[in-house]
Structures are given as structure tokens and as C-alpha cells.
Image: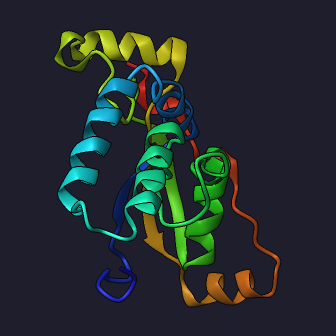
Amino acid sequence: MLRVVKPDGIAIHLMPSATWRFWTMCTHYPFFPHHLKKAARSFNSRTSSADVGKTKRLLDAMCEVLIPSRHGERGNVLTELYLFSRFAWLSLFHRTGWRVKVCFTNRLFYTGHGLFGSLLGLRSRRFMSHLLGSACNIFVLAPLSKNETAFFHLGKHRPELNVCNEQLYSK
């Protein structure tokens, strides 16, 4: 990304929050019948009666149903509670050459399972986010300057949480 952004350009990242990860884990089991049906379809489409690895694939399909899977590229469903936190995102952006100009939440509640689907409108999801947390963090980023990059690599620079500002929503 840094290679394609001009030095005075910005990038906007919408990243899942730890709140989203938590509520997606919590809603995994109410969606159990859906997961079971999906795993059965997947298992049946990949196996034949003469298949030697049928038992292993059955166990894999059962694990997919019983244990929530990770959403990201690394870690697991539990470590994602930290990896999706604002602090972890800020640290990652700084390590990869970005300065976080501002961050805020999307002020919407939703899970990875589409809890209540279209039954809840934006107004309801906005209200729920005040009680249960927002599903997304929005980061406005700019490339670090050469001076900032050198300073960062000396270990003098730490991501600051004060760039995260909820006052952007005040009217």
C-alpha cells in the first residue's frame, strides 16, 4: 500500500474490532444448525464412500462446527480479541510505516453471523452499538515521513491512543 500512496496521500482502513470478534464468538452457537448444515454439505461434496480419509474429513467438519474459526490471517479466535483491538491495529500500522491521523468507530453493531439480519435497521444497530460496542474501527492513515520512520526504528516512537477520537460524531 505504501508504494502506491503519494507522500501527502491518505488511506482509510475499516478494520474489525475486538467487540465484533467477541460478539461473533458469542453468536457462533446460536447459529449452530446453520453451521452444521453447511459442514454436512461441504463434507458430502468432498467425499465418496470409498474415500480412505473420510473419517479425518468428518472430524475436520465437526471441528469447524464446534469451534469458531478465526477471521484474520494469524492467531486464533481467542487471540483475535487482542489482534482486533485498537491498540493492536495502531501498533501494526506504525510498524508497517503508517502514521494514524485519526481513528474512530463506525457506531454500528453487527456480528460475523448477521445477527437479526435485515430485521434491524441502521437506527437500531446504531443504538445497540452504544450498549454493546461498535463492530468496526476506522483508521485514517498517512505514510510516515523519512524522519518519523528513522525515529520509529530507533525505538523512540510508540503508537498513541489519543488519535482515536469519538468526538468526530458530535453534532
Tell me the quadrant of the picture where the N terminus can be found.
Answer: bottom left
Please identify the quadrant where the C terminus is shown. top left
Task: Answer above or below: position of 89 versus 145.
Answer: above
From the top left corner, tell me how far across and down residue 135 is, in percent: 44, 33
Query: Which image quarter: residue 18?
Result: top right
Side of 119 where 15 appears, left or right: right
Closer-to-camera residue (120/51): 51
Residue 123 screen position, x and y as percent: 27, 11
Position of residue 51 measured from the top left corner of the image (x, y, whole percent) = 30, 68
Q: How is the image coloured?
A: rainbow
Q: Residue at x 41, y 52 (%)?
A: 58
- In the image, is residue 152 above or below residue 16? below
Residue at the spot 20% in from the left edge and 10% down from the top edge: 119
Name the foreground residue: 64 vs 78.
64
Q: Which image quadrant for residue 125? A: top left
Foreground: 39 or 154? 39
Q: Is residue 58 something one can see in this rendering?
A: yes
Q: Please name the residue shown 29% across and 85% down the image.
A: 4
Q: Percent position (x, y) of residue 101?
A: 50, 58
Identify the residue shown where x is 26% and y is 34%.
37
Among all residues in the image, which is located at the extreme front? Answer: 50
